[in-house]
Image (spheres, grey):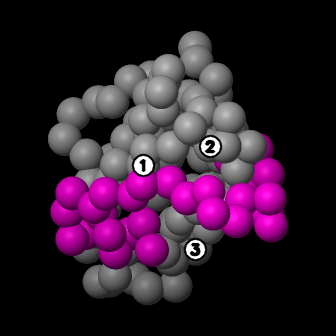
Amino acid sequence: MGQLRDALGAACPEVEGRARARLTAEPSGGLHDWLPQRWAFETETESATLELDGTGHARAIDGSQGPVDVSIIWTLPDLLEVLAAKSRSASFVGKNPKVRFRTANGQRAFSLLRGALGL
């Protein structure tokens, strides 16, 4: 297992918590309409995919898997630091990942759940 997959896996409970809270608060529409999601994280040395199913369950897998809704490209050290802290600090001023939205639903879901990853 890679460092990136491990870091994303550690963030999965927070992503699930936020997703399930949204799904419960809004019994129809909103996040319900935008799931499932697949977000690819790419660095100079590793890649991993975060999958979120229709019930809000999240899992991390190695590599970039299948068609994705969002691509996040950043350096491995910065990405690992943010995922471990689950927040971006002042030390990240000027350091931003490249985020590419591949689907409109990806952009919508990412805007709601990105905070769970510190992004």
**The residue positioned farthest toward the front in the image shown:** 94
The quarter of the displayed image where residue 66 is located: top left
Give amino acid for label 2.
Answer: Leu
Image height check: is 96 above or below 29? above
Asked if residue 97 lies in the magenta stretch, the reply is yes
Q: Residue at x 72, y 59 (%)?
A: 92
Q: Nearer the viewer, residue 4 or 78?
A: 78
The quarter of the displayed image where residue 7 is located: top right
Q: Which residue is mark 2?
A: 79
Give amino acid for label 3.
Answer: Ala
Which residues lie in the magenta part? 83-111
Contact check, label 2 and label 1, Cβ < 8 Å? yes
- Please rate how many residues cluster around mark 3, counting C-alpha atoms within 10 Å: few if below 14, some from 14 to 19, many from 20: few
Looking at the rendering, in which quadrant would you find the N terminus? top right
Q: Which residue is mark 1?
A: 72
**Which mark's residue is nearer the viewer, 3 or 1?**
1
